[in-house]
Each structure stands twice: as structure tokens, then as C-alpha cells.
Image (spheres, rainbow, N blue to C red):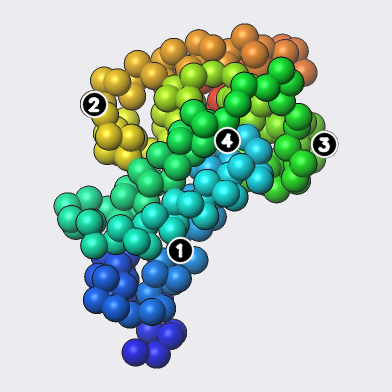
């Protein structure tokens, strides 16, 4: 099959061909979804180097475990689950630090924290504030907020990715929002005194 033809195949077919021994199709699958998987990793971990390592681990795991995919869910759901688990594993292994530095690659982190707006300096500052605020909440709450409030997944889709009940996702989101709100309250006054979105403080990234 000519390489250009792979773009016409859906995710399930690309994965099936990979399992059957095709040496190219997994690379096309990664290329198709890498940006969104990176966004989940950087928002969950908050540090570009950590996110890159977690993403690499996740893709290696997916490459090796592709034959375990049952086909009863979207390939993207399966990939997201592997990426989120890789991120949570790194969080659990990471030693507690007294003070976390800001991400070295701030431009990349800011770019993936949300779309561009009118004031680039303010947007960058706000996005980095959100990334650092996310690092201060429970990892399970963080992953739920990233998927639902920042990536736009439904509660049911996030539950499938995280491997838990929809009610658990709702609870984690509610508790995470309650933790984030005071951490990001200062953005109220910088936006002309308007209230933060009722749904979540995390939505101060890329929704205004």
C-alpha cells in the first residue's frame, strides 16, 4: 500500500494492520493523534520534559500492546487511557518537591493550554498559572478536569478513558474545580471584575 493511502484509513484499520505486521501504520496513527495526546500529557503533568517522557512511554506501550485492543471502543479512547495512565504513574513516582519550577518550555506549554487571544503576554501568564494550579490538586481530579473541562470530552467518554464510573468522574471534576477556583481567583480582577466561569476555573484557559 502506498504511504499516502494510509491517510484514508480509519484508526481501527490502521491498528489492525499494525497488529498484522505492517511496519508503517502505527506511525501514521501516532502522527494523527499526537498533538491531542501531547495536550493531555502537558496539562496533566505541567512540565514539558515530564510530558514528553510520559508520551513516549505511552506510545511504546500502545505499540507493544496493540493486540490487546478489543475494538469495542474508539482507538482514541484506548490511546487516551494509556497516556493518562502513563502520566499518573509518573506523578506517583515523582518525589515531592518543595518548589516546582515553571516549565522551561513555556511557549509550548502556553500554546497547548488553549487558543491564542488578543494579549499574548497575558494569555501566556494565565495559561502557565493554570498549569501550575493543576499541579496542586489531586492527580485523579486533575486528569478528570483535563479531559472534561480542557479537552471537551463528555463525562461518559472521560469515564471510559479513566476506567471508572461516570459518577466518579463527576465527583472528581467537582472537587477539582473547588480546589482550582481559589488558586485562580486573581484572574477575576484582571478581567474587569467579571466572575470566573461557573463551570470551572480551568476554563479560564482558552474559553474567553
Q: Nearer the viewer, mark 3 or mark 1?
A: 1
Disc nearer the start of the sequence (4/2): 4
With 127 as the anchor, is 179 left or right in this view? left
- The answer to whether residue 202 of the structure is visible from this angle is yes
Disc nearer the start of the sequence (1/2): 1
Residue that label 3 marks: 121
x, y (%) of residue 72?
17, 52
Instruction: Characterize the local packing of mark 2: few (<14), some (14-19) or many (20 or more) Cα atoms within 10 angstroms.
Output: few
Disc nearer the start of the sequence (3/2): 3
x, y (%) of residue 157?
30, 38
x, y (%) of residue 200?
51, 20
Q: Could you say whether the residue bearing mark 4 is in a helix, strand or loop? A: helix
| Whole-number angstrom distance, CA of label 1 to CA of label 4 | 20 Å
Seen at 26% across and 71% down, the residue is: 19
Query: Residue 155 shows which numbered tag?
Result: none
Seen at 19% across and 57% down, the residue is: 71
Depth check: 85 or 126 in front?
85
With 152 as the anchor, is 206 left or right in this view? right
Q: Nearer the viewer, mark 4 or mark 2?
A: 4
Q: Could you say whether the residue bearing mark 2 is in a helix, strand or loop? A: loop
Q: Could you say whether the residue bearing mark 1 is in a helix, strand or loop? A: helix
Q: Is residue 135 above or below residue 31?
A: above
Q: Nearer the viewer, mark 3 or mark 4?
A: 4
Disc nearer the start of the sequence (1/4): 1
Q: Nearer the viewer, mark 3 or mark 2?
A: 2
Query: Residue 165 shows which numbered tag?
Result: 2
Query: Residue 30 shows which numbered tag?
Result: 1
Amino acid at each position: 500500500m502506498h504511504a499516502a493511502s494510509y491517510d484514508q484509513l480509519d484508526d481501527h484499520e490502521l491498528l489492525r494492520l499494525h497488529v498484522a505486521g505492517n511496519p508503517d501504520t502505527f506511525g501514521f496513527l501516532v502522527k494523527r493523534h499526537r498533538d491531542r495526546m501531547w495536550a493531555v500529557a502537558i496539562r496533566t503533568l505541567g512540565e514539558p520534559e515530564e510530558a514528553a517522557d510520559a508520551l513516549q512511554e505511552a506510545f511504546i506501550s500502545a505499540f507493544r500492546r496493540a493486540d490487546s485492543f478489543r475494538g469495542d471502543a474508539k482507538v482514541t479512547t484506548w490511546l487516551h487511557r494509556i497516556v493518562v495512565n502513563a502520566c499518573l504513574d509518573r506523578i506517583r513516582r515523582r518525589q515531592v518537591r518543595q518548589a516546582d519550577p515553571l516549565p522551561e518550555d513555556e511557549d509550548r506549554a502556553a500554546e497547548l493550554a488553549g487558543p491564542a487571544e488578543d494579549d499574548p503576554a497575558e494569555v501566556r501568564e494565565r495559561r502557565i498559572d493554570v498549569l501550575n494550579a493543576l499541579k496542586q490538586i489531586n492527580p485523579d481530579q486533575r486528569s478528570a478536569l483535563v479531559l472534561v473541562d480542557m479537552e471537551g470530552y463528555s463525562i461518559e467518554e472521560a469515564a471510559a478513558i479513566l476506567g471508572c464510573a461516570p459518577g466518579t468522574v463527576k465527583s472528581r471534576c467537582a472537587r477539582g474545580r473547588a480546589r482550582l477556583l481559589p488558586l485562580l481567583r486573581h484572574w477575576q480582577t484582571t478581567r474587569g471584575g467579571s466572575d470566573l466561569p461557573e463551570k470551572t476555573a480551568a476554563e479560564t484557559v482558552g474559553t474567553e
